[in-house]
Image (spheres, rainbow, N blue to C red):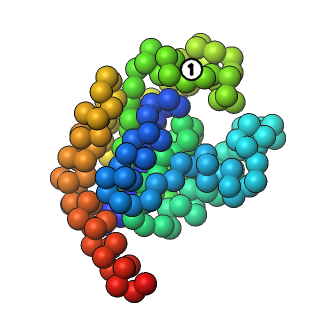
Amino acid sequence: MKNKVLLIGMPGSGKTTLSRMLSKILQVPYIDMDDFIESQTGKEISQIFQNGEHYFRYVETQACNVLAKKKDLIIAAGGGIVKKPVNLKYFEQDTLILFIKRPIEEIIKDIDLSTRPLLKSGMHKLELLYKERYSLYKKFSDYTIENVGDINKTLEEILKIMKDEKDIIDLFKENKKRSEIYE
């Protein structure tokens, strides 16, 4: 049974914003994976990348291993989580994985490329990463959600999928009630 939701997609696709919105509506915690990695390592993502992308991916895999063991959680993954299949393997049994798909033209309007270690070289790099990762996002996700225009419509679509998908929303509520009984 699915007991958490993982949002995957390109940087700037809306994963963190949607995770926050879902968290508020469903009253379950959300975790931005990059924030989690920073809190666990005591270093900013850009500092971790100074040791190379390979090292960052190792740290990211460790974070996936930890977060996959939790339940009743919304997780906004880093854009490159799909580069190591083991990362998604940790989540495949009990996690609803949603690919948040947003056109590059929309992404470029909203993000500061200089703060993203792999995107500092600009739009061309973003396009290359998109081409490299797109098929992986599709492969590892249960559903693809288009995030174009009104983010509230995107949120509604996610909530509908969660309702249809063995009613994860009710499971979150049920688990919350159980935990309140034991507190």
Residue in the image at 38% along x and 79% along y: 179
Per the image, the residue denoted by label 1 is 126
Residue at the spot x=61%, y=48% of the render? 35
* Image location of residue 47, percent across then percent down: 78, 40
Residue at figure coordinates x 34%, y 72% from the top left: 176
Q: Position of residue 129 (x, y in %)?
A: 56, 25
Disc 1 crowd, CA 10 A, few/some/many (<14, 14-19, 20+): many
The residue furthest right is 51
Please indicate, yes or no, whether residue 9 appears anywhere in the rendered image: yes
Above or below for 56 versus 23: above
- What residue is rendered at 37% in x and 79% in y? 180
Q: Can you say which quadrant of the picture contains the C terminus?
A: bottom left
Tell me if residue 139 can be seen. no
Q: How many numbered discs, if any?
A: 1
Type of amino acid under label 1: Leu
> Dot 1: what SS?
helix
Residue 132 x/y as whole percent: 53, 26
Q: Which of 134 and 17 is in front in this view?
A: 17
Q: In this view, does 117 lie to the left or right of 162?
A: right
Q: In which quarter of the image is residue 126?
A: top right
